[in-house]
Amino acid sequence: MCFYKCIPDRSQFQDNVDGPVPWAKMCDFSFIAEQVSHHPPISAFYAECPQANVSCNAFVHTKSKFMGTSIGVHNIGHGMLSLNNHKEDYSFSYPSGYARSIFNVPWFEFGGSCYLTCAQTCFRAQIEFQCK
């Protein structure tokens, strides 16, 4: 559970007592995450900024694979980003992640596809992450 101060002078804003971080202000970005299952391990999170009228909730669990000098992590799950001022909800998925050259000079990259869709506007996007 944490929050980020988005503006320097927060004194004019009320506390977000019904939000995930009760001592945060309405102008702050609040975030809470929890492991909701252990077998398989599944994490869920919720984030919001009431002043911007934006919220996001999501869940993710992973499947890992060792590939010689690399580790691949397939992220399973999806999230929902709500832009309440526009009455739009965007559903999204996650790309896979890869830790490369783990025994030498390690580096990280994303790979695979993720999707972003909005039922209200019928907007859809597929983002392809190319691995080296």
Image: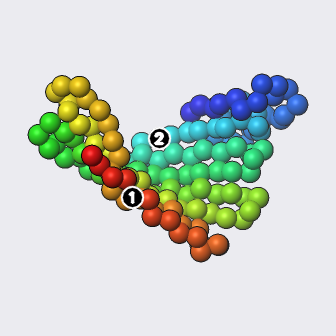
Q: Quadrant of residue 5?
A: top right
Question: Residue at 39% of width from left, 58% of height from top?
Answer: 128
Structural crowding at the residue carrying mark 1, measured as other residues with C-alpha within 10 Å and reported as few (<14), some (14–19) or many (≥20): few
User: Residue flagged by tag 1: what amino acid is it?
Assistant: Glu
Q: Is residue 60 left or right of residue 71?
A: right
Q: Dot 2: what SS?
A: strand
Q: Considering only vertical position in the picture, is 65 above or below 101?
A: below
Q: Considering only vertical position in the picture, is 103 above or below 132?
A: above
Q: Dot 1: what SS?
A: strand
* Quadrant that contains the N terminus: top right
Give the CA separation, mark 1 to mark 2.
29 Å
Query: Is residue 101 at all visible to an observer of this figure?
Result: yes
Q: Which residue is mark 2?
A: 34
Q: Is residue 54 left or right of residue 123?
A: right
Q: Is residue 11 left or right of residue 39?
A: right
Q: Which residue is mark 1?
A: 128
User: Residue flagged by tag 2: what amino acid is it?
Assistant: Glu
Point out residue 50 in the picture as x, y percentages from the top left corner.
Answer: 74, 45
Question: Residue at 59% of width from left, 74% of height from top?
Answer: 122
